[in-house]
Amino acid sequence: MACEVSQDDQIGEALLIRVVRHEVMRVAAEGNAAPPALPEDQPISNSQDQMLVQQLAETIKVIGDRLDQDQAFNDMIDGLVKVADKSSFWKLVEKVFTDDQINWGRIIVLFYSVGKLSAKMVLAHLPRIVSDILTLCLDYFRRNLLEWIRKVGGWINSIASLAHYSFERDFGSSSSLISLSSGVLFISGVLLGGLIVWRLNRCA
């Protein structure tokens, strides 16, 4: 019997809010900055979907750690903070989806970049911009990314793809967004093991 299709819009919203909240609260605590008011991610009643959100959040942390080591990425985020308005988000979208091609890596990079940009806005004492950027990203997700996610089978199919995701393949080694010298990012077997358990539980 086929697995039930997950609520991909709910998973995406919960994931994005969780990523932004994590990055904002982390820098607020470290820099003694006042965090902006952010929405709570709505609890997902399905325990398997909730586990998937958690695994994806952990995956984004791993990818984020690698992105944070890249100077071009940090320079790009710092440049967007200087814009300090809603257009910062649209400039970010242009960087990530420069050729209008969608894939899991770019979606995850967008989510992490929005979290990173939001955190930098807090440090720059521009908390009012954070909620605007989050709202714009949620709207962009629903209008431009959600249909693609559904067509490729939902968020459940993202972890296996991200396990051997190549930044250089999708952005190019000379990209203004990503210039990581390491082409392949390996996500730990714990996440893939969790994926297998998730599938078994969903299909039971």
Image (cartoon, grey):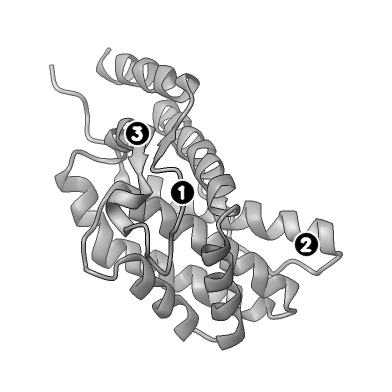
Q: Name the amino acid type tagged 1.
A: Ser
- Kindly state the secondary structure of the residue where label 3 is placed: strand
Q: Nearer the viewer, residue 105 or 178?
A: 178
Query: What is the spatial separation of the Cα atoms under label 1 and label 3, in whole angstroms?
Result: 15 Å
* Placement of the C terminus among the 4 image quadrants: top left
Q: Residue at x 69, y 80 (%)?
A: 126
Q: Nearer the viewer, residue 184 or 42?
A: 184
Q: Nearer the viewer, mark 3 or mark 2?
A: 3
Q: Which residue is mark 2?
A: 28
Q: Of marks 1 and 2, which one's residue comes earlier in the chain?
A: 2
Q: Name the amino acid type tagged 2.
A: Ala
Q: Name the amino acid type tagged 3.
A: His
Query: What is the spatial separation of the Cα atoms under label 1 and label 2, in whole angstroms?
Result: 31 Å
Left or right side of 140 for 152: left
- Disc 2 residue crowd, few under 14, some 14–19, many 20+, Cα 10 Å: some
Left or right side of 14 for 104: left
Q: Residue at x 37, y 32 (%)?
A: 163
Q: Which residue is mark 1?
A: 181
Q: At which x and y percent is residue 112? A: 50, 55
Q: Nearer the viewer, mark 1 or mark 2?
A: 1
Q: Looking at the rendered structure, which numbered label has been put on residue 164?
A: 3
- Kindly state the secondary structure of the residue where label 1 is placed: loop
Tell me if I can see residue 98 in this picture. Answer: yes
In this picture, is 108 found above or below 188? below
- Kindly state the secondary structure of the residue where label 2 is placed: helix
Q: Of marks 1 and 3, which one's residue comes earlier in the chain?
A: 3
